[in-house]
């Protein structure tokens, strides 16, 4: 088994620079909440409208979420290796940009196979931005005496993702449908 090296937390960080540490925890708490809310929890609300629009069964549409979760699981090893070698900043930035583009692509799917392709991409992007890389950032940023508190805060705040995004997504679907199509013509006011 190959030996791994753990990079110790910078003793100046999380110890003397607590304002910056608090900003990191706040940013990760918010991004984890939004990430789980949009990439995972919103799917439950969008399931039936997507199935109807795509002319597919809810089973077929649910399979796309399963494919997303499996893609995220398959990405765990390369993501972990990247985090060990390079840290989380670049990985989480690329993952966030990818997730944003994929959510936009999700709104434009016209066929079940497109939904599967987009959701597999979302699963891969989720592996780069959700809890695992966020926790790795916290572990390397904070001194051992502050890690548990930082991890707890991010976990508790992100735990509200379903409480926020399930009703919010339902409200948006009720007023706007599950997606807005890009077109050159203005929307109908009927």
Image: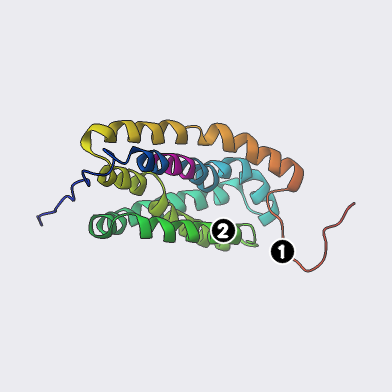
> Residue extending furthest right?
190
The residue nearer to you, when weighing 62 against 131, is: 131
Q: Which mark is residue 115?
A: 2
Residue ID for mark 1? 182
Residue 54, visible in the rendered structure: yes
Examine the rendered structure and indicate whether residue 6 appears above or below residue 171.
below
Question: For residue 147, what is the image quadrant?
Answer: top left
Residue bounds of the magenta highlight: 25-31
Q: What secondary structure is found at the residue carrying circle 1?
A: loop
> Residue extending furthest front?
16
Mark 2 neighbour density, 10 Å: few (under 14) some (14–19) many (20 or more) = many
| Residue at the image point whose x is 54% and y is 57% from the top | 100
| Residue at the image point whose x is 31% and y is 56% from the top | 79
Examine the rendered structure and indicate whether residue 151 appears above or below residue 77.
above
Residue 126 drawn at (x, y percent): 43, 52
> Residue extending furthest bottom?
184
Q: What secondary structure is found at the residue carrying circle 2?
A: helix
Examine the rendered structure and indicate whether residue 38 appears above or below residue 164.
below
Relative horizontal placement of residue 187, taking residue 113 as reference (left or right): right
Relative horizontal placement of residue 75, taking residue 119 as reference (left or right): left
Residue 77 drawn at (x, y percent): 28, 55
Closest to the camera, between mark 1 and mark 2, is 1
């Amino acid at each position: 088994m190959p030996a791994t090296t753990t990079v110790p937390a910078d003793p100046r960080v999380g110890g003397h620079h607590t304002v910056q540490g608090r900003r990191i925890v706040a940013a990760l708490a918010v991004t984890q909440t939004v990430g789980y809310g949009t990439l995972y929890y919103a799917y439950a609300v969008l399931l039936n409208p997507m199935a109807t629009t795509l002319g597919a069964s809810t089973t077929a549409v649910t399979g796309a979420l399963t494919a997303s979760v499996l893609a995220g699981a398959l990405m765990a090893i390369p993501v972990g290796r990247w985090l060990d070698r390079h840290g989380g900043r670049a990985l989480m930035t690329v993952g966030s940009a990818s997730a944003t583009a994929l959510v936009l692509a999700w709104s434009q799917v016209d066929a079940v196979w497109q939904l599967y392709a987009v959701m597999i991409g979302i699963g891969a992007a989720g592996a780069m931005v959700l809890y695992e890389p966020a926790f790795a950032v916290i572990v390397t940023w904070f001194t051992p005496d502050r890690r548990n508190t930082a991890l707890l805060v991010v976990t508790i705040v992100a735990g509200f993702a379903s409480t926020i995004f399930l009703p919010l997504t339902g409200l948006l679907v009720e007023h706007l449908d599950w997606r807005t199509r890009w077109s050159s013509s203005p929307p109908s006011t009927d």
